[in-house]
Image (spheres, rainbow, N blue to C red):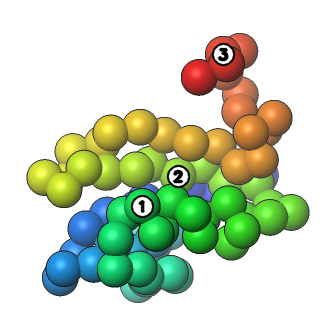
């Protein structure tokens, strides 16, 4: 089973939270910093992360580990 998460801006930082919850799992000052932390956080786990833009819209979705992506795509 794969859990879903969201990376969103909140109060001048970026937070990762599980879908359906607003409780932060991880926090970082910048989006780039968080994008470096996420792969380490999900090492050995399966997860789908929706990455939001500063305006709240979804920019992209990433699957960890990459080979767990259900779509047959390279991107």
Q: Quadrant of residue 16?
A: bottom left
Task: Please give the residue where the numbered disc 1 appears in the rendered image.
Answer: 32
- CB contact under 8 Å: marks 1 and 2: no
Going by the picture, which residue comes out furthest to the left? 55
In front of the other: label 1 or label 3? 1
Q: Is residue 37 left or right of residue 54?
A: right
In the rendered view, tell whether residue 18 sits above or below residue 12: above
Residue 54 point in image, percent of width and height:
19, 56
Contact between labelled residues 2 and 3, with CB atoms less than 8 Å apart: no
Residue at the spot of label 3? 73
Query: Which label sits on residue 49?
Result: 2
Mark 3 residue element? loop
Q: Residues within 10 Å of mark 1 (few under 14, many from 20)?
A: few
Which callout, 1 or 2, points at the residue further toward the start of the chain?
1
Residue at 59% x, 70% y: name it.
37
Q: Residue at x 25, y 50 (%)?
A: 53
């Amino acid at each position: 089973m794969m859990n879903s998460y969201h990376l969103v801006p909140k109060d001048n930082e970026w937070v990762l939270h599980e879908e359906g919850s607003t409780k932060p799992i991880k926090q970082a000052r910048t989006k780039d910093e968080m994008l470096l932390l996420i792969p380490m956080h999900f090492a050995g786990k399966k997860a789908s992360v929706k990455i939001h833009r500063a305006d709240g819209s979804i920019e992209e979705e990433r699957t960890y580990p990459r080979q767990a992506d259900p779509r047959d795509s390279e991107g």
